[in-house]
Amino acid sequence: MSIVLQGGRVVDPAAGTDTVADVLVEDGRVAAVGAGLDGDVAVDVTGLVVGPGFVDVHSHADSVAGHRVKAMDGVTTTLELEAGRLPVADAYGRAAADGRPLNFGFSASWAVARAVAHLGPAWAGALPLGVLGDPGWQRSSTPAERRGWLRLLQEQVEDGALGIGVLLGYAPGSDPSEFVALARLAAEAGVGVFTHTREPREIDPSGPVDGPGELVLAAATTGVRMHQCHVNSTALRHIDRVLADLERARAAGSTVTVEAYPYGAGSTAVGAVFLDPDYLQARGTRPDQIVLLPSGERVADAHRLREVRATDPAMLCVIEYLDESDPADRALLERSLVHPDAIVASDSMPVVWPDGSTDAGAWPLPPGGLTHPRTAGTYGRALRRLVRETGRWDWVEAFRRCSYLPARLLDFAPGARRKGYLAPGADADLVVLDPLTISDAATYRDPLRPSTGVRHLLVNGTFVVRDGELDPAAHPGRPLRGEPLRA
């Protein structure tokens, strides 16, 4: 069955074009873009913006429920590249068996590989949130342990992992030479590294290195494709310095990229090493800037924070690191998003219901799901603020940041080469949105409220959203896997 989207404002960020045209979809691809096209199904999209679906390279919401709220936010491909999975074959197998509304993929997990090498093979799988503060995998590796986790990562890359995901900020005392060894492995394989860096030196002067500087140095010395995750929540009020260093590295020839999300609060497990009360003080964060998601409790003081970390280290929380009601903080956050070539990525969190379940077959989603609002609202929020309200981006630039540039991070994955642009031959991963109403609706109190303004969403040529309504039966998502380029 062919589909023609008629009379929309068609945006192709690769060509830099924004024109009124029809888009013909056949066999899961864009067959033609032009005037007067015919198809078996015609959809009038006059007055709406048609562009390549958003590619989210940083999402931990890899359930069907997570995919559904992301579809309503304009996302067609959602990838777990920061934390990763190990073994990736199991992660791909489970997603394929369950079916997914959106395209999906996984990097190889550095943290899990280290846990297996340090603590034993029982640690293979998704890294439990409660282990993020466990010194057993955080410490520096022995030579034998390092060889062990490097071998594991090599195997995962050979098995189609989308590069290597590194939670270095959760093991801030580990030997910096380990990161260089990992970068060298990825460079030789021709894949990317996606890193949650250690803290900047301004925050943690006692650390072994400046976190962002470590990333820049590894890229320069090994030639690896290096991506810094969520610069807004790791650089904090030092964003300008960190971005300037990254820009100098790019000017010198390194392949260094960066992402940000449009919120002044982050989220993780309360047991994370950088939420230790003594560590918080160096970050300029108070315990009462931490909110525990299950109860909504705002942590009163350091004593209460230590108590929660000891009794339930896996508990999800929200950390307020910038005050979005403060014009200076809001401008700082915006600078991370509009920095040249910075991409939008959500850092979507898992969705968890009070009974402990992490998925839901029903749509709309059952009430009470706990997560960060960035899971459901990142792209609607970015477009509302930077296109509709401030005009910092036009529509070509918006799709370049949300679709084209993130897909280009994965040029070592054959399937990614057909994503992120809108021209004949591209995958028919398309979003049709209302430029006047596109917006986030999720809040910290109601974090799963779907965004507004996405009128249609096609994944591999199949409607997942049509006329603003999600189809719960649609599971057209396909795996995106790597194909390493040997040096």
Image: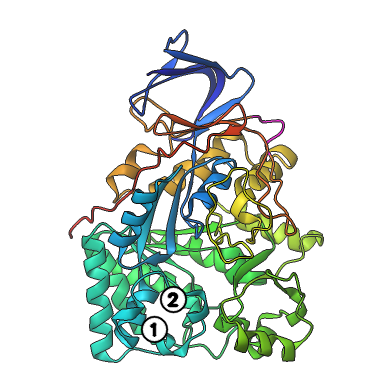
Within 10 Å of disc 1 (Cα), the crowding (few <14, some 14-19, many 20+) is some
- What residue sits right under mark 1 in the picture? 176
Residue 84 sits above or below residue 451 on the image: below
**SS class, disc 1:** helix
Answer left or right for 107 relative to 374: left
Within 10 Å of disc 2 (Cα), the crowding (few <14, some 14-19, many 20+) is some
- Look at the image and give the residue range highlighted in magenta: 434-438
Residue 305 sits above or below residue 97 on the image: below
Query: What is the quadrant of residue 92 in the picture?
Result: bottom left
The amino acid pointed to by label 1 is: Pro
Q: How many marks?
A: 2
Quadrant of the rendering where the N terminus is positioned:
top left
**SS class, disc 2:** helix
- What residue sits right under mark 2 in the picture? 214
Q: Viewer-proximal residue, 373 or 352?
A: 352
Query: What is the quadrant of residue 167 in the picture?
Result: bottom left
Q: CA distance from mark 2 to mark 1?
A: 8 Å
Q: Assess whether mark 1 and mark 2 are in contact (beta carbons under 8 angstroms).
A: yes
Residue 318 sits above or below residue 64 on the image: below
Residue furthest to the top: 36
Q: Position of residue 213 (x, y in %)?
A: 47, 74
Q: Is residue 337 visible?
A: yes
Quadrant of the rendering where the C terminus is positioned:
bottom left
For marks 2 and 1, the one nearer the N-term is: 1
Q: Which mark is residue 359?
A: none
